[in-house]
Image (cartoon, helix red, strand yellow):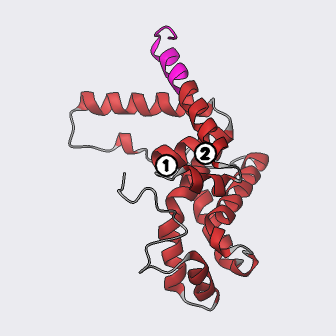
Amino acid sequence: MSSDRGAPATTPASTEPTDARLIADAAGGDRSSFEILVRRHYRAAYAVALARSGNRADAEDLVHDAFVRAADRLESCRQRDKFAAWLCTIVRNLAHNLRTRGSGNRTIALQPDTARSNQSPERDAQLAELRERLQIALSHLPEIQREVVLLHDVDGKTHDEIAIIVGTTSGMCRQHLFKARKQLRRLLRGLEGLPDA
């Protein structure tokens, strides 16, 4: 994780433009400003999409569609300093729509664990099994807990940043994270066949 973990994503270093500035420039036709927004918020949007969809292919599609929709509707982002929250709301809505109508005729994407790596085949198999067990355990969490744990532990967001993105308080984010981790430990132990502690 980076050393600037405490710095909110919507208030970048003083040399970088704020989200509000980037949105204004992008709405005025500056494509590079929107590209910066995409790079800045892709991981958070992906974490929310993965928490909602449960698989990488759908998550990638949801994030792509969310950024396309956001680009088309930048003027409707009322709180420009909270772009990440607005974007993640779009992701959630698209994920809901996907679940409602079903995924249709989807193809299965090549999973990273099927490609050759520099590690031993045994290590690759262990990592694939761990990834599968973790995905199963994550699927048993409530959506809000999946979002919080992925935003915090995968994307490195702070509790304050997560609170803005999911629309709750920092204290509730901490509580969701605590409960999610406790549940994940319990579920992963059960998947290993170990007794609960």
Left or right of residue 24, residue 191 in this image: left
Residue 7 seen by the camera: yes
Say left or right for 97 vs 108: right
x, y percent for residue 130: 41, 29
**Disc 2 designates what residue?**
147
The residue under the point 65% across, 64% down is: 87
Mark toward the start of the polypeptide (1 vs 2): 1
Label 1 element class: loop
- In the image, residue 86 lies at what x, y percent? 69, 65
The answer to whether 196 is drawn above or below residue 108 in the figure is above
Q: Residue at x 50, y 23 (%)?
A: 185
Seen from this angle, which residue lies furthest front?
171
Q: Residue furthest right?
A: 100
Contact, mark 1 vs mark 2 (Cβ under 8 Å): no
Residue in the picture at 66% in, 62% down: 85
Give the vertical position of 157 relative to 141 (above or below): below
Q: Residue at x 45, y 16 (%)?
A: 192
Q: CA distance from mark 1 to mark 2?
A: 23 Å
Q: Which residues are magenta?
A: 184-197
Q: Is residue 3 magenta?
A: no
In the image shown, does 38 or 69 lie closer to the viewer?
38
Q: For this view, does 112 lie left or right of residue 135?
A: left
Q: What is the number of the mark on residue 109?
A: 1
What number of labels is visible? 2
- 163 over 111 or under it: above or below: below
